[in-house]
Image (cartoon, rainbow, N blue to C red):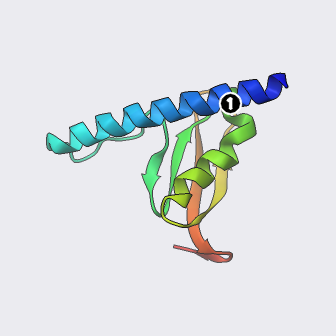
Amino acid sequence: MVRKVVVRKVVIALTVIAVVSLCGSAAALALGAEFAGPGPAVTGNDTGGIFPYSPDVEPIYHQVAGDHCARWGRFAKVTSIHRVYGDYVGFVCYDRPGKIH
């Protein structure tokens, strides 16, 4: 029961961070910024992306990548995970098994 509460809090925190990050990125792009760079949430597009690793995302990093790729109707595959606080988890998005863009 305690684990579910912790996972729920992490998901809520990541959602809030993602919303704040998206608003900030949109504002930066509207002001003419060419490259917003990686932020505190998922950074990527329809081919994949990265997000910061922390011990709190350990149980849900596959879900975070999957949720990002689902925006384009794709599946996610985590390609690298460096279990160092502040390093990144990398992933790719693909249409069907065996086909990565």
Count residues near mark 1 (Cα–Cα under 10 Å), then give few for <14, some for 14-19, many for 20+.
few
What residue appears at the point 67 percent right and 34 percent down from the top-left corner?
57
Does residue 54 show up?
Answer: no
Q: Quadrant of the N terminus?
A: top right
Q: Is residue 6 left or right of residue 64?
A: right
Residue 61 horizontal/vertical position (percent): 67, 43
Q: Quadrant of residue 92?
A: bottom right
Query: From this viewpoint, which residue is outermost toward the left?
Result: 31
Query: Looking at the picture, how far across and down is residue 90, in whole percent?
Result: 58, 49
Q: Can you see residue 51?
A: yes
Q: Secondary structure at mark 1?
A: helix
Residue pictured at 67% horizontal, 40% vertical: 82
Q: Nearer the viewer, residue 41 or 71?
A: 71
Task: Give x and y (percent) for residue 34.
Answer: 22, 47
Q: Residue at image x 58%, y 34%?
A: 87
State whether residue 39 is above or below residue 78. Answer: above
- Where residue 62 sits in the image (x, y, percent)? 68, 49
- Amino acid type at circle 1 is Arg
Question: How many numbered marks have been drawn onto this rendered protein structure?
Answer: 1
19 lies left or right of 27: right
Q: Is residue 10 above or below residue 32?
A: above
Picture layout, residue 61 above or below residue 95: above
Residue sitting farthest toward the top: 2
Q: Nearer the viewer, residue 1 or 42?
A: 1
Q: Which residue position holds label 1?
A: 8
